[in-house]
Image (cartoon, helix red, strand yellow):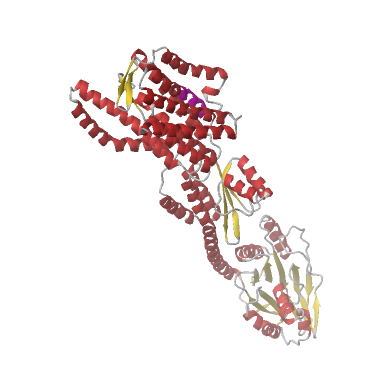
């Protein structure tokens, strides 16, 4: 059996089997019916070649061969408009009237064919034949090329409107297969000689070979369409098909130029033609490759270089929010996604998936995985995401830490994500947890450094206004003070003013730490130093701090003002002052009032105390009370009752020795107190 005949039979048998499989699967679906019809037209085309081989080239046999070729052009246009999903804006299927109108050119070609007006003459050559179209040549070629261009236009719209990667794979494989025999067959020959006229060559055996290749690609698509990307196969197939068509046209042009214009011999024409084609092959191929890649929305990029640059940008961000925003911008730039969103943990439970399948990011694959595991809850969540146009889902997690997930919508061009893009996003997403942890660690270090700087500034500010503890005298009274401040500024301060018109000593305890505490103490210091009326000191401080209500600035204070014989004691928020006399401790219970600055009405309180003999007035902040209760197991009052103090200095010494060990070990609060006795 001749090789041409064998190829024709093989192609016809394979395509018939494929047609039967497709129509048997879903006979009522329009896509399956059209797909089956296309394959049967390919079969008829192969049979036409077999008939010519056995019976020779005759007018009737050429008609048998060209009839399915003409019908293929029209049917292929309809098929591109309905596969993988019907395209409502495709002109050829908008209405039955449109379908009929678009069928008229094909019907006209068939009328020309069977009324002997399609070609004027034919001639048998080795492994084929030539035909001369005659006066209708450009009309015939124009109709065939018009159908091809309409198919490509509709194919472009179908490709942009694919909803899932699976649909995209089906689309690309199917049309890659069918374009081989259609574009590289009679249509490309017609296209290459459109502007020349004259004889058109038809080579027997070319179409069956391309038909067999088409059949293998279609078979592979049916068996494994959802497992592999086909951009490379598709691009190579289409690029070389178009390159073949372009080179065929160039060959005809050069030969016509050499023979008819320059009057060169046939041998020299062939030599020059081969040299020209060799010179222009690579540029044409490269140009067509870029055209096809642009047509199908592909971006060429070096994944390693892109990831390196993206990671560098991510690691240079100062906080997690900026880093995530940078990540979204990078992914959007790389992929052209219509939407990218970061969902924090528990932010939107219906968009968070549990038991996430490893290395599965495509939403269709995720749904299939949950369906296989019979996990209905997560399957419904994944379906919900798909219905909301989410195509890729990336969890951001490492070890036992979960930071959220990235939801990526379809591309703006509706082109599916390539495997390279999915892997690139996966690589970047896997680095996010480490970058987030690094940012947290750096933030903690910077925060510690900032806190240390703030504490240094606060300590310097506090030193400027705070009274240095020791022994002082006002009127007939001796005042002994003790201060131990912890690192971090807890808010204790003593202010002693010896101004003749404004003599006082005050113990402050700001209700904050660090800069806030120093700010509060500076406000209190300023008001107390500039206000001579002791009652108004608290009123002004209270009104002033209320303006900082959002910051909740407030402080406790005990104010002692003196005359020759007595001490006027005012207390707001500090522990009640104590009178120590003859192994007894008497709290001044009348002096209980709220701290300064809180959202309560200020209630004034004061009491006059007259000391005699060895009696002492004791005032402190709450830190001293805490240290006795926590480490001594007794209240400060009980401790003082058991002591016998000779004077204020002796009282200070006894208390400081009692707490020395705990203070040296770093007690967590400030210790501040004053003891007032009569001058001796």
Identify the residue at the far front of this view: 1
Q: Pick the quarter of the image with the N terminus.
A: top left
Tell me if residue 201 comes above or below residue 357 in the rendering.
above
Could you tell me how many numbered marks the image carries?
Answer: 0
Residue at (76% x, 64% y) in the render? 594
Tell me if residue 633 comes above or below residue 319 in the rendering.
below
Whether residue 680 can be seen here:
no
- Quarter of the rendering containing residue 241: top left
Tell me if residue 507 comes above or below residue 263 in the rendering.
below
Does residue 76 show up magenta in the picture? yes
Q: Position of residue 110 (x, y in %)?
A: 45, 16
In the image, the segment drawn in magenta is 71-79
- Quarter of the rendering containing residue 20: top right
Query: Looking at the image, which is closer to me, 22 or 571?
Result: 22
Residue at (53% x, 28% y) in the render? 34
Q: Position of residue 365 (x, y in %)?
A: 57, 47
The prevailing secondary structure element of the residues shown in magenta is helix
Whether residue 520 can be seen here:
yes
Query: Looking at the image, which is closer to me, 356 or 479?
Result: 356
Q: Position of residue 287 (x, y in %)?
A: 34, 36
Does residue 214 show up magenta in the picture? no
Tell me if residue 28 comes above or below residue 142 in the rendering.
below
622 left or right, relative to 136: right
Query: Looking at the image, which is closer to me, 144 or 444?
Result: 144
Q: Position of residue 360 (x, y in %)?
A: 56, 50
Query: Looking at the image, which is closer to me, 569 or 448?
Result: 448
Q: Pick the quarter of the image with the C terminus.
A: bottom right
């Amino acid at each position: 059996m001749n090789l041409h005949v064998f190829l024709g039979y093989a192609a016809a048998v394979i395509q018939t089997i494929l047609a039967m499989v497709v129509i048997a699967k879903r006979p009522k679906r329009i896509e399956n019916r059209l797909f089956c019809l296309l394959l049967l037209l390919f079969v008829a085309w192969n049979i036409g070649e077999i008939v010519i081989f056995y019976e020779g080239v005759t007018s009737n046999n050429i008609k048998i061969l060209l009839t399915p070729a003409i019908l293929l052009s029209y049917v292929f246009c309809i098929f591109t408009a309905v596969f993988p999903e019907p395209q409502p804006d495709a002109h050829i299927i908008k209405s039955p009237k449109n379908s009929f109108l678009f069928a008229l050119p094909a019907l006209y070609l068939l009328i020309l064919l069977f009324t002997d007006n399609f070609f004027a003459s034919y001639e048998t050559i080795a492994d084929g034949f030539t035909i001369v179209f005659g006066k209708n040549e450009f009309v015939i070629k124009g109709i065939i090329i018009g159908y091809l261009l309409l198919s490509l236009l509709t194919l472009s719209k179908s490709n942009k409107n694919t909803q899932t990667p699976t649909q995209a794979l089906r689309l690309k494989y199917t049309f890659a297969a069918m374009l081989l025999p259609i574009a590289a067959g009679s249509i490309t020959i017609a296209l290459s000689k459109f502007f020349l006229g004259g004889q058109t060559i038809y080579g027997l055996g070319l179409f069956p070979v391309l038909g067999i290749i088409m059949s293998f690609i279609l078979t592979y698509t049916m068996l494994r369409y959802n497992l592999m990307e086909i951009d490379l196969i598709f691009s190579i197939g289409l690029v070389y098909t178009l390159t073949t068509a372009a080179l065929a046209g160039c060959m005809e042009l050069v030969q016509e130029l050499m023979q008819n214009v320059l009057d060169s011999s046939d041998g020299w024409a062939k030599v020059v033609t081969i040299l020209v084609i060799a010179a222009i092959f690579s540029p044409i191929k490269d140009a067509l490759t870029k055209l096809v890649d642009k047509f199908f929305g592909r971006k060429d990029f070096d994944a390693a270089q892109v990831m390196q640059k993206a990671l560098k940008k991510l690691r240079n961000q100062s906080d997690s929010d900026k880093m995530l925003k940078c990540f979204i911008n990078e992914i959007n730039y790389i992929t052209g996604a219509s939407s990218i969103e970061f969902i924090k943990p528990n932010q939107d439970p219906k968009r968070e998936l549990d038991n996430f399948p490893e290395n599965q990011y495509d939403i269709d694959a995720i749904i299939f995985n949950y369906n296989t595991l019979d996990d209905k809850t997560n399957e419904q969540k994944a379906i919900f995401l798909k219905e909301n146009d989410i195509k890729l889902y990336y969890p951001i997690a490492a070890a036992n830490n979960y930071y959220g997930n990235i939801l990526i919508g379809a591309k703006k061009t509706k082109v599916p994500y390539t495997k390279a893009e999915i892997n690139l996003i996966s690589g970047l997403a896997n680095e996010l947890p480490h970058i987030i942890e690094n940012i947290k660690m750096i933030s903690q270090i910077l925060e510690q450094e900032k806190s240390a700087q703030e504490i240094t500034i606060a300590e310097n500010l506090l030193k400027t206004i705070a009274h240095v503890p020791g022994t002082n005298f006002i009127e007939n009274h001796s005042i002994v003070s003790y201060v131990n401040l912890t690192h971090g500024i807890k808010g204790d301060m003593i202010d002693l003013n010896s101004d003749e018109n404004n003599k006082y000593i005050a113990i402050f305890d700001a209700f904050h730490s660090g800069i806030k505490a120093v700010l509060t103490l500076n406000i209190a210091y300023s008001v107390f130093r500039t206000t001579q009326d002791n009652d108004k000191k608290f009123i002004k401080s209270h009104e002033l701090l209320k303006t900082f209500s959002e910051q909740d600035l407030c402080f406790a204070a005990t104010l002692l003002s003196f005359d020759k014989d007595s001490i006027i004691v005012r207390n707001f928020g500090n522990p009640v002052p104590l009178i120590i006399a003859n192994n007894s401790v008497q709290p001044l219970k009348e002096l209980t009032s709220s701290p300064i600055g809180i959202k309560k009405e200020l209630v004034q309180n004061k009491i006059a105390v007259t000391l005699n003999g060895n009696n002492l007035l004791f005032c402190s902040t709450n830190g001293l009370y805490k240290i006795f209760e926590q480490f001594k197991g007794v209240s400060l009052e009980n401790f003082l009752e058991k002591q016998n103090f000779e004077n204020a200095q002796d009282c200070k010494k006894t208390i400081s020795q009692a707490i020395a060990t705990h203070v040296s070990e770093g007690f967590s609060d400030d210790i501040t107190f004053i003891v007032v006795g009569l001058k001796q």
